[in-house]
Image (tube, coloured by chain):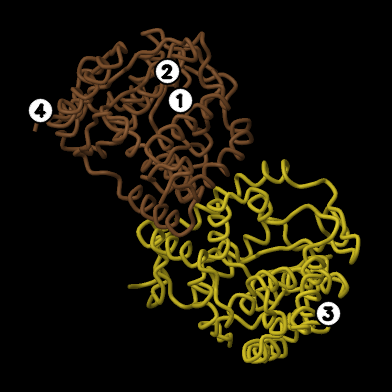
Chain colours: A brown, B yellow
Amino acid sequence: MQCSCGRKAVYHRRYSGQHLCARCFRRMVEKKFMETVRSNGFIAHTDTVACGVSGGKDSLVLLHLLHGLQKKVRFSLFALAIDEGIAGYRDRSLPYVTKACETLGVPLHVRSFKESFGYALDEVTAMKERVGACSYCGVFRRSLLNSASRELGATKLALGHNLDDESQVILMNMLRGDFARFGRMGTYRKHVNDQFVPRIKPLREIPEKEIVLYAVLAGIDFDFEECPYAPEAFRDEVRQFLNTTEEGHPGTKHALLRTYDKLYPFLNEALQPSVLPSCERCGEPSIRPLCKKCELLDAIRDGLARDDQS
Amino acid sequence: MQCSCGRKAVYHRRYSGQHLCARCFRRMVEKKFMETVRSNGFIAHTDTVACGVSGGKDSLVLLHLLHGLQKKVRFSLFALAIDEGIAGYRDRSLPYVTKACETLGVPLHVRSFKESFGYALDEVTAMKERVGACSYCGVFRRSLLNSASRELGATKLALGHNLDDESQVILMNMLRGDFARFGRMGTYRKHVNDQFVPRIKPLREIPEKEIVLYAVLAGIDFDFEECPYAPEAFRDEVRQFLNTTEEGHPGTKHALLRTYDKLYPFLNEALQPSVLPSCERCGEPSIRPLCKKCELLDAIRDGLARDDQS
């Protein structure tokens, strides 16, 4: 098949019916990224953007695109990597981050669970009585991304969630009846607490498949490995269903995101407190008096103490 | 396994962890029906309820439960069956309706597509250029259910949609990005046009499986056959996914309905016109100047005329 420009097509974008050559494909991804940034007002020239980077395809494509955008919008950009302390995984993916930042000339900051909270993730998961690894990791990572971005002077925190991630989470929250969380996923929240760095997701309308292909075509070297901690079973079911449905009905993931985006203004109005309180211990934004991170840290301290005694 | 009353259990209600004997199971279904009617204010003693009946399990269980409710709430009740004109199907299921109405002593009214609109469904689907059978049937049936209920003096139109139907449609509308339709499925709409008979769905919180078992245990004779017109492929995919997910995570269908019900007040506020206009030709409630039924009737007249000429 041929691209409309006459070159040989490398990609069939089924949901729009287009066949695209490598060059037009890259332009199309860049255009979609730009449109998402612009239509949501994600970035102004006064912004300092922290780009969360893991070494995987999504975050490195995001870093690449943000760096490109700096030619048009003169905002400041730095990369922020979190070292959870997962032996054999993060120590192997961080070099991809270092290399990408060096190539692009983007400053890189690394923060670790161990230094920030006192425990590496592997120490936490070695506890006898524990919940799933992702429950600790998600809470700690979100907390650290926010506090480190803020301390480093960021006004926005950019995350690499793609269309697949977003549509999976929308569906998971609906199927779980988690209305509160359902109302918290929109483009970005009003700045209701000056300790909270607003999160932006410039890749939310780009399918995972296109992110991978973009990385390959743009020569972005990334870590292919998945996190060794078992992925969530429920998410896998939802992923599979959405992929099958997208196959039979191209455009389904986009439609799901669109429905959510139309709901979001009502949800935001109804569910968001006009001012987000702060954790009474650490001062980070938190709906409850003690934030989830501080609560988990207490549980870990107690759990490890029990393990020592036994 | 034993029921908590000591009798032998016939059903494991996984989403609540209960094992139920035949008697407790029937009571539980009746209680859930009553709760849904009461908490939504579906029926008052001043109401005249038209119960849409097809001869299938859902509508006959609904008729049975509504008839039982009359002992507690002194509303009026009649049954309304629609004969679409599907040879070998509806003529076989209608006797189940007649028998149920005779047994319960509930007046029955039958309206046909042929008499009301001039065409039986089989005539329409014999056209050369046509859309799917369900597209005609759904529009005509909804229109006729409303106009006949109203003409027969009903103040509410009760429909047999169960939890599976409701959760499938919620998910389908989300996945299709059909935001307008997504906002139109709630418990029941405000009476915004005096030609519109508000619809109530008293079985919406009861899983299909439990409706079947209830029908069997209560000795309700119903037609097992499915409509011969091919079911919608997309609905089948969604049904399968929801059934698999419910299997692995009992309570998923209820959770989905709960999320929707929480969204509904916002959607209703945002999407419903305060007054629903009427079709300029037939006078039935319609958002557009010409209602969908009148539009389809025009297309059928033209289509059949073209077929005659060729």
Residue at the spot of label 4: A308
Q: How far is mark 4 from mark 2, CA to CA?
A: 29 Å
Residue at the spot of label 1: A288
Task: Chain letter for mark 3, please.
Answer: B
Q: How far is mark 4 from mark 3, CA to CA?
A: 80 Å
Give the residue type that dot 1 points to.
Answer: Arg
Task: From the image, state whether disc 1 or disc 3 is nearer to you.
Answer: 3
Q: Residue at x 55, y 69 (%)?
A: B232
Task: From the image, state whether disc 4 or disc 3 is nearer to you.
Answer: 3
Query: Is label 1 in contact with label 3 (beta carbons under 8 Å)?
Result: no
**Discs 2 and 1 carry the same chain letter:** yes
Q: Position of residue B185 (x, y in %)?
A: 66, 56
Q: Secondary structure at mark 2?
A: loop
Q: Position of residue A124 (x, y in %)?
A: 19, 30
Q: How far is mark 4 from mark 1, CA to CA?
A: 31 Å
Q: Is residue A305 visible?
A: no
Give the residue type that dot 4 points to.
Answer: Asp
Give the residue type that dot 2 points to.
Answer: Cys
